[in-house]
Image (cartoon, rainbow, N blue to C red):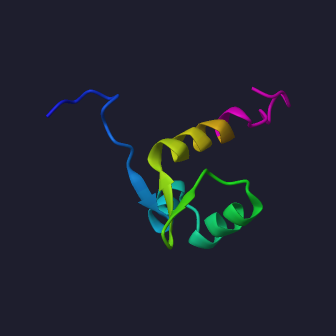
Amino acid sequence: MSDDPARRETELLTITEAAELLRAPVATLRYWRHLGTGPRSFRLGRRVLYRSDDLRSWIDAQHDGQVSPAAGVRR
């Protein structure tokens, strides 16, 4: 088996697993999904799933978009 990152499949997480990773209630993820402001998700049949790469990208985007409290300047 190869450890080539390009060949590695992205892990799919349920809404419960995504909520655990984000340390947020499942209801919050559902609300963000309703508003269209949360991490990218999709339906597979009846299930809502999140790609782990999408969650990490969303977390990074939230971090990069933060305002520095001391300077009041966007980083």
* Residue 72 forms part of the magenta stretch: yes
Write the residue at 50% across / 73% down.
46
How many numbered circles are shown? 0
- Quarter holding the N terminus is top left
Q: Is residue 52 left or right of residue 40?
A: left
Q: In screen coordinates, is 27 left or right of 44? A: right
Magenta residues, start to end: 63-75
Q: Main secondary structure of the magenta part?
A: loop
Q: Residue furthest front?
A: 45
Q: Residue at x 59, y 43 (%)?
A: 59
Image quadrant of residue 60? Answer: top right
**Residue 33 place in picture, x, y as percent:** 67, 62
Residue 23 percent coordinates (x, y): 53, 59
Q: Is residue 11 above or below residue 13?
A: above
Closer to us: 45 or 11: 45
Q: Position of residue 67 (x, y in %)?
A: 79, 35
Residue 27 placement (x, y as % from top left): 63, 73
* Quarter of the picture holding the C terminus: top right
Residue at the outermost left position:
1
Q: Quadrant of residue 70?
A: top right
Compared with residue 57, is residue 15 higher up or lower down, i.e. above or below? below
User: For this view, does 28 lie left or right of residue 15?
Assistant: right
Report the residue at 76% width, 61% height from top. Answer: 35
Q: Tell me where residue 72 sits by quadrant.
A: top right
Question: Relative to residue 53, is residue 25 drawn left or right?
Answer: right
Q: Residue at x 30, y 32 (%)?
A: 7
Please tell me which residue lies in front, 1 or 21: 1
